[in-house]
Image (cartoon, rainbow, N blue to C red):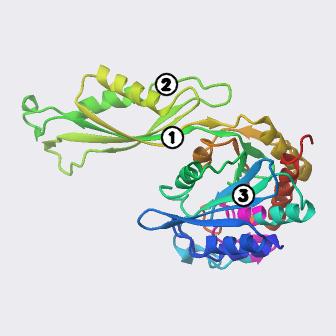
């Protein structure tokens, strides 16, 4: 199995989220040929595709590799030095959309699994793949639905590794052992519209807006043992007023909260309502939870990947909970989950690229991870 060829094959599929564009079918064909039980799952009106595949080798743990084959759009393709969906190898570097996020990791999943299976025909456990074409967008019909399907079908996963690009600069630099929760919100502050010359007949919501923004910016906490402080960030303020002689009827504020394990999303919403109520202004609050915070509680899972990373890269990886959300937030509901992948320096960028040496080393790390996780001691 050639990890570079599989990486290039996957990157040639124009699988802009939430389209598989043949990428999941390509992986399924490979896994079918190895004897995996493959389920191509479709959810939503658009029939968004997902893949769950399992190879059972005994009564031991089910170890799952999880990730996504969808990618973000390339942007203006004329800005690229090469075609974004025609992978290019130049000076030991692989160029193309998905090189970093995260088609090379999926190739490494495949190659490492095949190597492990060939060398351990009677291993005690199962290897599974949970892959989606709906991660980069709203993620409404991806991993979240597969997890619900697994629960309904009573299919158990014991350990999961998500192959997101966790390393900022060099391979072996960082492992994600948890993620902050994320909540998006919108506040509509209500006033009374009128002429600026007669403010006594109006209620300017912008006056309340200033107080609301100050209240929202108040500190939520000082962080926890494993997470940095929670943070609310105002992302947009919109009055929708194009003239200067009109007091607006309302003003809209959008924000995001990244919260640690001191809170559940309901706690954050309660805090926000209490702050807004104390200001005694008329408002409407809308929220959408992208995910709760989580932390990997399995020492064995952590040690299995840390040991593999150290052996291959000679680096001592940082165990981090920084960064944005990932599909690990859904998987954390059913099993311990950890994240380790390639270097993410160029993900989502024009001329996205990754070192071929890093791809090969990632495959070896995943192989050693499998070797470790199926051992009682290592």
- Kindly report the distance in space between the C-alpha atoms of the residues bearing marks 3 and 2: 42 Å
Magenta residue span: 89-109
Does residue 178 show up? yes
Q: In the rendering, at what x and y percent does residue 71 appear? A: 58, 65
Residue at 54% x, 59% y is 136
As for residue 250 lying within the magenta part, the answer is no
Please state which of the two labelled residues, at mark 1 or mark 3, is closer to the viewer. 3
Q: In the rendering, at what x and y percent does residue 336 appear? A: 69, 41
- Mark earlier in primary sequence (2, 1): 1
* Residue 54 appears left or right of 257: right
Q: Quadrant of residue 88?
A: bottom right
- Kindly report the distance in space between the C-alpha atoms of the residues bearing marks 1 and 3: 28 Å
Residue at disc 3, secondary structure: strand
Q: Which mark is residue 110?
A: none
Residue at 62% x, 65% y is 39
Residue at 59% x, 41% y is 333
Q: Quadrant of residue 2?
A: bottom right
Provide the residue designation for mark 1.
182
Provide the residue designation for mark 3.
128
* Residue 189 appears left or right of 99: left
């Amino acid at each position: 199995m050639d990890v570079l060829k599989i990486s290039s094959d996957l990157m040639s599929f124009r699988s802009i989220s939430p389209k598989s564009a043949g990428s999941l079918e390509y992986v399924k064909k490979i896994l079918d040929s190895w004897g995996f039980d493959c389920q191509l799952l479709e959810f939503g009106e658009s029939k968004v595709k997902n893949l769950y595949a399992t190879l059972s080798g005994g009564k031991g743990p089910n170890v799952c590799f999880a990730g996504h084959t969808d990618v973000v759009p390339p942007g203006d393709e004329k800005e690229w030095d090469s075609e974004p969906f025609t992978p290019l190898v130049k000076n030991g570097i692989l160029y193309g959309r998905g090189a970093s996020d995260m088609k090379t990791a999926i190739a490494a999943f495949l190659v490492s699994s095949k190597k492990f299976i060939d060398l351990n025909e009677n291993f005690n456990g199962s290897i599974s793949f949970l892959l989606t074409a709906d991660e980069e967008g709203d993620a409404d019909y991806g991993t979240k639905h597969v997890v619900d399907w697994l629960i309904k079908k009573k299919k158990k996963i014991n350990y999961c590794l998500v192959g997101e690009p966790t390393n900022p600069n060099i391979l072996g630099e960082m492992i994600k052992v948890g993620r902050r929760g994320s909540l998006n919100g919108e506040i509509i502050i209500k006033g009374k519209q009128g002429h600026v010359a007669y403010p006594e007949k109006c209620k300017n919501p912008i006056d309340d807006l200033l107080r609301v923004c100050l209240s929202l910016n108040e500190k939520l906490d000082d962080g926890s043992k494993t997470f940095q402080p929670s943070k609310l960030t105002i992302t947009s303020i919109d009055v929708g007023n194009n003239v200067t002689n009109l007091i607006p009827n309302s003003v809209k504020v959008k924000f995001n909260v990244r919260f640690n394990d001191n809170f559940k999303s309901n706690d954050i919403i309660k805090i926000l309502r209490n702050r807004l109520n104390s200001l005694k202004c008329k408002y409407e609050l809308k929220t959408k939870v992208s995910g709760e915070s989580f932390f990997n509680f399995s020492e064995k899972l952590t040690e299995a990947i840390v040991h593999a990373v150290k052996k291959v890269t000679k680096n001592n990886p940082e165990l981090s909970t920084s960064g944005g959300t990932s599909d690990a937030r859904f998987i954390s509901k059913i099993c311990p989950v950890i994240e380790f992948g390639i270097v993410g320096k160029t993900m989502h960028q024009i001329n996205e690229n990754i070192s071929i040496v890093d791809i090969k080393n990632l495959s070896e790390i995943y192989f050693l991870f499998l070797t470790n996780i199926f051992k009682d001691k290592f």
